[in-house]
Amino acid sequence: MKRRFRCPIETKKEIVAEVVAGYRTEAVARRYGVSPDTVSKWVRQYRDEVGEIMARKRKTEEQLLQDAERLKELERKYQEALKLLGEKDVQIQMLEEIIKKNHPEWKHWQ
């Protein structure tokens, strides 16, 4: 006898939300290990009840996009800061060399 798959209603609604969002039924079914017929049945059964889940997923996706943009901006600023820091290090070395040439008795300040 085949073992019956027990799935919480919230999980079923999450699966339905993925299908309603545009993912192929077969792909979603394969990912969760259920038959495509079962997923199709759940879609018919819960299609009208997944609005809240879809809104939450949309909000999460929007937040992820904003976070990704912010991360790119922070990475750009970090690289710019590293470049400036490197330029300052070069300037310090050049100034130390000039001071050493003009004042051989001067010792490095560190």
Image (cartoon, rainbow, N blue to C red):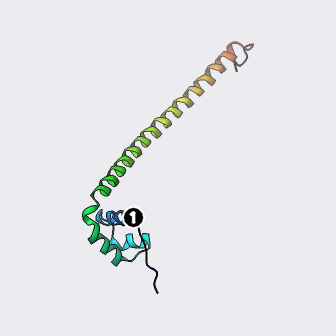
- Which one is nearer the viewer's eye here, 30 or 10? 10
Name which residue lies at 32% across and 57% down: 53
Residue 94 falls in which quadrant of the image?
Answer: top right
| Residue found at the far right of this picture | 105
Left or right placement of residue 100 versus residue 18 in this view: right
When the figure is inspected, residue 84 is found, relative to residue 31, above or below; the finding is above
Rendered location of residue 50, percent (x, y)? 29, 61
Q: Residues within 10 Å of mark 1 (few under 14, many from 20)?
A: few
Q: How many marks?
A: 1
- Which one is nearer the viewer's eye here, 55 or 11? 11
- Which one is nearer the viewer's eye here, 96 or 11? 11
Rendered location of residue 3, percent (x, y)? 46, 81
Secondary structure beneath dot 1 equals helix
Left or right placement of residue 16 versus residue 96 in this view: left
Rendered location of residue 7, percent (x, y)? 41, 69
> Which residue has dot 1 on it?
11
Left or right placement of residue 90 versus residue 66 in this view: right
Name which residue lies at 34% across and 64% down: 13
- Quadrant showing the C terminus: top right
Left or right placement of residue 70 versus residue 108 in this view: left
Q: Give the amino acid at mark 1.
A: Thr
When the figure is inspected, residue 34 is found, relative to residue 23, above or below; the finding is below
Name which residue lies at 41% across and 46% down: 68
Rendered location of residue 81, percent (x, y)? 50, 32
When the figure is inspected, residue 67 is found, relative to residue 89, above or below; the finding is below
Residue 52 falls in which quadrant of the image?
Answer: bottom left
Residue 107 falls in which quadrant of the image?
Answer: top right
